Image: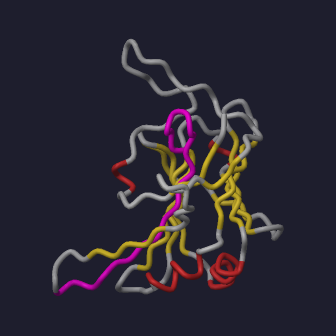
Amino acid sequence: MRIVAKSFFVLLTVFGAAGFGHAQTPKGKTTPAPVPAAAPAAPQGDASGNNTGWVARCTSASRDAPLECAMEQTAVLTKTGQLIVLVNIRVPGDTRTPVALIQLPLGLNLPVGAKLQVDEGKAVDVPIQTCEARGCYINAPIAPDVLTQLKSGKQLKVSFQNLGKETISIPMPLGDFATVYDKIK
């Protein structure tokens, strides 16, 4: 299986249920095979073959409400379209402090949590806070030093373990992170 990074303009709630073959499926449908531990990854572009990278969007509840902006990038399996990782970074209008929401698939070794690493820097352990039908989630503010690393880095690696205790590392390109972040801050 090949994993690719791809950005979407849709909200997190639009993504379908993703699993490692442990979620129930309707009769007559097959469940995707588990993700291998060291699956190769590559950026995927749009229909023309261009790399779309990080995507930014801003919304407001009304004309008088402050804008809330976010940027995101996803990694999906090419054959099935199954979401493996979604990284969403938003800057709430009231605090202006960036917050990361990371969606991971179901079927994880929850006690281990996940690790985030920019380039060859120190890996940071992050707890998985909750799971529901669409996946498991991490929600955390982004410290100023981590934001600096993301802006100057080449790759964010998101690592987690499946139920078979195999470590899965998903690279998320950071090439256009700084440019897109400047649009949402």
Give the image location of residue 95, x and y in percent. Answer: 41, 86
Furthest residue to the top? 28
Give the image location of residue 53, x and y in percent. Answer: 55, 65
Give the image location of residue 149, x and y in percent. Answer: 70, 79
Q: Is residue 91 magenta?
A: no
Q: Residue at x 35, y 58 (%)?
A: 11
Q: Which residues are magenta?
A: 64-83
Q: Nearer the viewer, residue 22 or 60?
A: 60
Q: Nearer the viewer, residue 171 or 43?
A: 43
The quarter of the picture where the N terminus appears is top right
Give left or right: position of 144 versus 16. Answer: right
Please determine whether, in this image, residue 163 is positioned above or below residue 83. Answer: above
Residue 124, quarter of the rendered image: bottom right
Furthest residue to the front? 48
Furthest residue to the left? 63
Q: Nearer the viewer, residue 128 or 183?
A: 183
Q: Residue at x 72, y 75 (%)?
A: 153
Give the image location of residue 65, x and y in percent. Answer: 21, 84
Image label count: 0
Q: Nearer the viewer, residue 173 or 165?
A: 173
Q: Residue at x 42, y 18 (%)?
A: 29
